Image: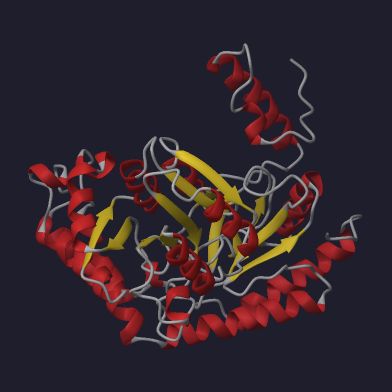
């Protein structure tokens, strides 16, 4: 089978008619070898140090030993916070290294309950359920709640975990943040399904823009649908106290389901869903990936401390906003297109997959570790370099990022970043 490796994406190897998985794997190996030889397979870089603004990487052929990192969603730098680290150590010392069972049959520990209680209170609600990853907080919960008689209504830009969560139900999508299209779907599907859920992000992971949450909640109530908000990238970043997009208009009690992750602001790993106690209790015994998976390790005790620190040390959010404003202004001064971002996610729009990979390669040569984002994460014509800002970046580090971009614009033959 002929595949153009220069323009192909990972998705082209997902399901090839008539070719079994082992042959697809062989084709993908040829593709990845081709890309790697050109320095364009800029994924799964081997890190030799922890998540921080500056990281050590092992990249064959690259002489740099350390890189300014703009790939991490550790927005407040809590993975390296001494109090969070100490809490994890204390958790292991007290509880051991594993929970040893699923939650229903021996694996629900006091520290799990504390995390559930704290994340519920964080969003001014009474109950929450935690999962071992943020991905399954969406995928497992939605698979449990929505079946063949129901309808999921998705913003096209929601996370892959949401799409996976809707594989057992009916699905309709509306163009990103398009309220007219959403209302049209709500009107035309009225009375045709047992349950309808409108599922959105608070901050969208690729463009960094915000959902018009108040308007969407109003439409849901008007047409008898439930609202689901995944604000993984907004929590700790948006709002005066870091509660995310839901805080901007005090919609804590208006959104039916809130989901998120502990792997970003809260410095560890895991996911959560916050809702009314009855729904939470239902999920604890009906959501299969929760019910049959071993629970989070005692190191997750550190999540409770990270939740506390959002309020105890609000200056981290101040620093994050200052750093984000600084880098945003610098990128715009270079004439780069960063789209409608309103968060700590700063994407530089490139538009061409090959150009995107080449620019990522050049940034690595300049000592900047950034992510190339291509189809299917974004549309084929919307390739970009995505950067995430951290509260712990220094001005000097951000200046190095800007200097690298200035060099890339000069060095690269691609002048039109659109």
Q: For the point 59% across and 61% down, which residue is it?
A: 66
Q: Quadrant of residue 305?
A: bottom left
Q: Is residue 205 visible?
A: yes
Q: For the point 82% across and 62% down, which residue is it?
A: 408
- Give the percent coordinates (x, y) of residue 269: 35, 56
Between 85 and 238, which is closer to the camera in this rendering? 238
- Give the percent coordinates (x, y) of residue 384: 72, 56
- Please state if 76 lies on the left or on the right of 370 as rendered: left
Between 29 and 16, which is closer to the camera in this rendering? 16
Q: Is residue 52 above or below residue 351?
A: below
Q: Is residue 194 above or below residue 262?
A: above
Residue extending farthest to the top is 18
Q: For the point 63% across and 57% down, which residue is it?
A: 181
Q: Is residue 9 above or below residue 204?
A: above
Q: Is residue 76 visible?
A: no
User: Image quadrant for the N terminus?
Assistant: top right
Q: Quadrant of residue 166?
A: top left
């Amino acid at each position: 089978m002929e595949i153009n490796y220069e323009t192909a994406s990972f998705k082209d190897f997902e399901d090839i008619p008539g070719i079994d998985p082992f042959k697809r794997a062989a084709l993908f190996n040829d593709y990845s070898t081709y890309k790697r030889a050109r320095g364009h397979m800029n994924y799964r870089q081997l890190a030799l140090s922890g998540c921080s603004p500056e990281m050590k990487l092992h990249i064959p052929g690259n002489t740099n030993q350390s890189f300014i990192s703009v790939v991490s969603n550790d927005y407040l730098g809590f993975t390296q916070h001494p109090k969070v680290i100490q809490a994890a150590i204390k958790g292991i010392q007290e509880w051991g290294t594993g929970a040893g069972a699923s939650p229903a049959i021996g694996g629900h520990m006091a520290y799990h309950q504390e995390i559930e209680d704290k994340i519920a209170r964080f969003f001014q609600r009474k109950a929450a359920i935690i999962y071992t990853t943020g991905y399954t907080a969406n995928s497992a919960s939605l698979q449990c709640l929505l079946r063949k008689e129901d309808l999921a209504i998705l913003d096209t830009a929601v996370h892959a975990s949401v799409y996976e969560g809707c594989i057992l139900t009916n699905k309709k999508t509306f163009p990103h943040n398009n309220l007219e299209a959403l209302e049209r779907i709500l009107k035309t599907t009225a009375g045709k399904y047992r349950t309808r859920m409108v599922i959105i992000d608070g901050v969208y992971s690729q463009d960094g823009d915000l959902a018009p949450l108040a308007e969407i909640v109003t439409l849901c109530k008007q047409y008898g649908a439930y609202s689901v908000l995944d604000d993984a990238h907004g929590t700790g970043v948006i709002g005066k106290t870091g509660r995310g997009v839901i805080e901007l208009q005090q919609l804590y009690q208006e959104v039916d389901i809130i989901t998120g992750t502990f792997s970003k602001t809260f410095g560890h790993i895991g996911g959560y869903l916050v809702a009314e106690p009855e729904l939470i209790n239902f999920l604890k015994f009906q959501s299969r990936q929760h019910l049959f998976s071993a629970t989070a390790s005692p190191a997750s005790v550190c999540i409770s401390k990270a939740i506390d620190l959002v309020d105890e040390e609000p200056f981290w959010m101040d620093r994050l906003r200052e750093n984000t404003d600084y880098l945003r202004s610098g990128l715009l001064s270079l004439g780069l297109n960063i789209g409608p971002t309103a968060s700590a996610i700063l994407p530089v729009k490139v538009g061409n997959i090959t150009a995107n990979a080449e620019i990522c390669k050049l940034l690595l040569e300049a000592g900047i570790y950034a992510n190339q984002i291509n189809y299917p994460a974004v549309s084929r014509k919307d390739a970009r370099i995505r950067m995430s800002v951290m509260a712990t970046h220094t001005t000097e580090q951000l200046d190095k990022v800007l200097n690298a971009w200035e060099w890339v614009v000069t060095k690269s033959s691609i002048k039109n970043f659109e």
